[in-house]
Image (cartoon, grey):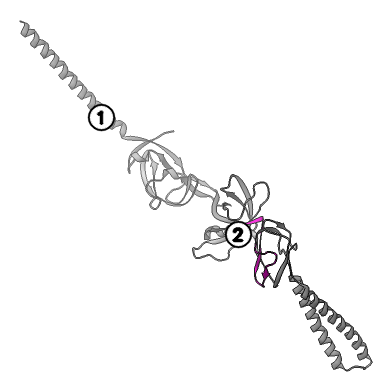
Amino acid sequence: MKKAVISLISLTVVGLIAYTLYANKEEMKADAKLSEVTSAVIPVKVVSVKKIALEEKVSADGVFIAKTDLALLSETQGKVVRVYKEKGSHVEKGELLAQVENDLIQSEVAAAQANYEKLQSDLERFTKLSENDAVTGRQLEEVKIGLKNAEAQYRSAKKRLENTYIRATASGNINDDFIQEGAFVSPGAKLYEIVDISVLKLNVKVSATEVLRVKEGDEVKITSSVYPDTQFTGKVTAVASKADAALKYGVEIVLQNKGDKTLKPGMYATAFFSFHNEEEKYYVDRNTLIGSVQDPQVFVVEDSVAKLRDIVIGETHNDLIRVLNGLDQNDKVVISGQINLAEGTRVKVLD
């Protein structure tokens, strides 16, 4: 009797397990069918193609250089007897920097001046005499020639004397000096290096399509890594007439370097050109693209069906990319859910 009860209980348990397994299997089949039904329509988000006139921004990198950066060379020879300005000094144009010995040249200037003044008197005297035919025309002509030669010698001597006084040919700071008292200098020797950083130049390169839109006088925004939170303003002063070997065109920008945030030559900078477009063009969100930039495609929704479309794209502006061909303004382009789509997939557009 006991064995019969145990057998009955065992059969009951086995039956319950079998029923549970069968019920689970049927439920899984029902879920699979439901999944097939629901996956037949893919939810997506779409955006419209925009026809707008954008303000295009183009950036170009360069290095600041000083507008005035010159080497002052000796135009005389002799011993340096006095140095008035040294490295680090600020100088104004025409200011005396140093002096070379000139005692002998001063004597030459005095002699040349005396001879010049004598011949001037002779010319006046011979001119009066010639009016009375007291001297020949040839004698008068010789005096005139002598006066011209004396004037040339006098001017030359004065120039040589002037060259012994080394003066700044531009305002700025002496970046370096190569002169000291007692040293002997020769013509062509480098004496000073003068740099004026109150005005800086930035030379950048732009493409052929961009250079046609750059004009002299245009204002350009400039940033530098040394002052990341500051924006400077420069002005285009020159645009290249021909391209370089890389088919780029040079643009020169001048910046007034004033204020508490002083820039220096040799610092890297970026210039930002803004071009306003009068013509409206087609643009779409760049996140709609699938595939590569070289072979761009998008999905568009037509009658709740996804259609794969090849497009031709142009330049990118932030999150927008220009569409040259393949889309028009009425198209609804999929921006979310593309990963689950294929040609002909039924879709539901989400709000």
Of 19 and 163, the residue lying toward us: 163
Does residue 34 appear to the left or right of 283 in the view shown?
A: left
Q: Main secondary structure of the magenta part?
A: strand
Residue visible at 78% across and 80% down in the picture: 153
Of 351 and 88, the residue lying toward us: 88
Which quarter of the figure has residue 131?
bottom right
Question: For mark 2, what is the residue?
Answer: 252
**Observer able to see residue 331:** no
Q: CA distance from mark 2 to mark 1?
A: 70 Å
In the image, residue 183 lies in the stretch drawn in magenta? yes
Residue visible at 45% across and 45% down in the picture: 286
Q: Amino acid at mark 1?
A: Lys
Numbered label attached to residue 8? none
Q: Where residue 252 sits: x, y (%)? A: 60, 59
Which quarter of the figure has residue 350?
top left
Question: For mark 1, what is the residue?
Answer: 33
In the rendered image, which quarter contains the C terminus? top left
Of 297 and 317, the residue lying toward us: 317
Of 320 and 202, the residue lying toward us: 202
Q: Where residue 32 sits: x, y (%)? A: 25, 29
